[in-house]
Image (cartoon, rainbow, N blue to C red):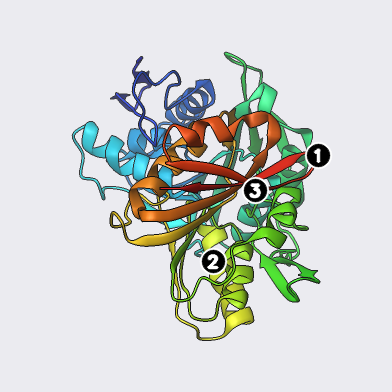
């Protein structure tokens, strides 16, 4: 893999989760462009730099030790990547302060470097949270590959920060440079909420939650077919999002024990708040993590999963396949993984390579619900 080579550092970087013969690199030309832009300003060692949405730590690891850098994002895997890449390049794993997107930002900051996220609601929430956190003379620079840079990103920067200057494209990457100006305080439109009829609950969704305006159609197909009569089973909602699968299941299974895990901090925050609203103080574990990587082997009876088919801008079934493997490891013999998936993704044959038996629980014209028994 090529090294990230900028005036700040030359780094050997890896993506998360790691996979053999990784076809993708852990940085791109937009990272290089941001770092070269900042280097041209010759920042001092006491310059306070905030990095937002640094995929695997390319920006923060480059700046560590050169300026006062903090990094905030919504990805557990992103922070895991930052820690591993710091160690990989001879720095302490905690050399950069990491701030989950579910926590407030505390400035002031002289420079803010932003990788434009796929979900523009996350960008909007982050820009709103920068209010009052920018030092005099601060600059906010957002970057993306041109093919992933919507016009709305510049509109959001202008609305919440100030006038925006777009750079020339370099290696198919572009910068949006915003100059802060006095603005009336903005009220965040997040979290959003919507109601379900069955089960009768209201769901709160922080800015980066998948399908935050309404229930996604895969989950809608899954809900009527959640397993019943689970008794005191140990159940995990893997990739829990706002927690709807676990909450609906828990309402039907009052003695079961639940673990909700997602790699999005805002999803975990939403799931915890939704569980509390629907189920009060009923015991639950809600955590951000790399799927079930931290789960003890053979410690679960049931896993519920609506697997993702993309990581940031990258589409593929790598994450889903990894979730299936994690579920198999965590389940007891005789335990079961229940999933919903698009028909065309062919999950049935993939699950059959890992599990003793795979059966179709239900189907719609677009989705299948499958049960895989270990």
Q: Residues within 10 Å of mark 1 (few under 14, many from 20)?
A: few
Q: Secondary structure at mark 3?
A: helix
Residue placed most toward the observer, 118 or 319: 319
- The residue located at (59%, 63%) in the rendering is 227
- The residue located at (31%, 26%) in the rendering is 9
> What residue would you read off at disc 3?
123
Residue placed most toward the observer, 222 or 75: 222
Q: Could you give the CA–CA distance between mark 1 and mark 3, rounded to whole angstroms?
A: 35 Å
Above or below 337: residue 186: below
Is residue 324 visible in the rendered image? The answer is yes
Q: Secondary structure at mark 2?
A: helix
Q: Could you give the CA–CA distance between mark 2 and mark 3, rounded to whole angstroms?
A: 17 Å
> In the rendering, at what x and y percent does residue 334 appear?
39, 55
> What residue would you read off at disc 2?
269
> What residue would you read off at disc 1?
365
Q: Could you give the CA–CA distance between mark 2 and mark 1, rounded to whole angstroms?
A: 33 Å
On screen, residue 216 versus residue 236, left or right, reads right
Foreground label between 2 and 1:
1
Residues tagged 2 and 3 counted as in contact (Cβ below 8 A): no
Foreground label between 2 and 3:
2
> In the rendering, at what x and y percent does residue 312 appear?
57, 36
- Mark found first going from the N terminus, 1 or 3: 3
Quarter holding residue 365:
top right
On screen, residue 248 versus residue 366, left or right, reads left
Residue placed most toward the observer, 66 or 11: 11
Q: Residues within 10 Å of mark 3 (few under 14, many from 20)?
A: many
Residues tagged 1 and 3 counted as in contact (Cβ below 8 A): no
Quarter holding residue 197:
bottom right
In what quadrant of the picture does the N terminus appear? top left
Above or below 254: residue 344: above
Foreground label between 1 and 3:
1
């Amino acid at each position: 893999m090529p090294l990230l080579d900028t005036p700040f550092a030359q780094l050997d970087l890896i993506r998360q989760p790691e996979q053999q013969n990784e076809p993708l690199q852990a940085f791109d030309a937009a990272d290089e462009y941001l770092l070269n832009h900042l280097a041209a300003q010759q920042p001092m060692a006491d310059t306070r730099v905030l990095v937002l949405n640094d995929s695997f730590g390319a920006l923060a690891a480059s700046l560590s030790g050169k300026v006062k850098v903090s990094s905030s994002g919504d990805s557990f895997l992103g922070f895991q990547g930052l820690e591993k890449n710091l160690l990989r390049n001879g720095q302490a794993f905690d050399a950069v302060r990491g701030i989950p997107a579910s926590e407030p930002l505390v400035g002031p900051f002289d420079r803010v470097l932003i990788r434009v996220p796929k979900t523009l609601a996350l960008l909007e929430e982050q820009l709103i949270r920068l209010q009052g956190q920018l030092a005099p003379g601060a600059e906010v620079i957002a970057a993306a590959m041109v093919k992933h840079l919507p016009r709305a990103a510049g509109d959001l920067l202008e609305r919440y920060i100030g006038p925006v200057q777009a750079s020339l494209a370099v290696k198919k990457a572009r910068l949006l440079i915003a100059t802060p100006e006095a603005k009336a305080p903005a009220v965040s439109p997040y979290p959003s909420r919507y109601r379900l009829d069955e089960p009768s609950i209201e769901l709160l969704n922080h800015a980066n939650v998948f399908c935050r305006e309404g229930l996604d159609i895969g989950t809608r197909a899954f809900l009527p077919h959640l397993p019943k009569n689970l008794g005191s089973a140990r159940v995990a909602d893997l990739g829990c999002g706002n927690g709807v699968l676990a909450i609906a299941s828990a309402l039907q299974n009052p003695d079961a024990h639940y673990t909700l895990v997602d790699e999005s901090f805002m999803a975990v925050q939403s799931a915890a708040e939704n569980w509390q609203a629907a189920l009060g103080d009923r015991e639950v574990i809600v955590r951000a993590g790399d799927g079930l990587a931290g789960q003890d082997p053979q410690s679960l009876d049931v896993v519920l999963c609506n697997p993702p088919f993309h990581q940031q801008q990258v589409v593929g079934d790598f994450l889903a396949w990894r979730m299936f493997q994690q579920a198999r490891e965590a389940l007891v013999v005789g335990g079961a993984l229940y999933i919903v998936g698009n028909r065309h993704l062919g999950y049935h044959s993939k699950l059959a390579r890992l599990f003793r038996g795979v059966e179709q629980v239900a189907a719609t014209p677009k989705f299948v619900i499958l049960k895989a028994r270990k």
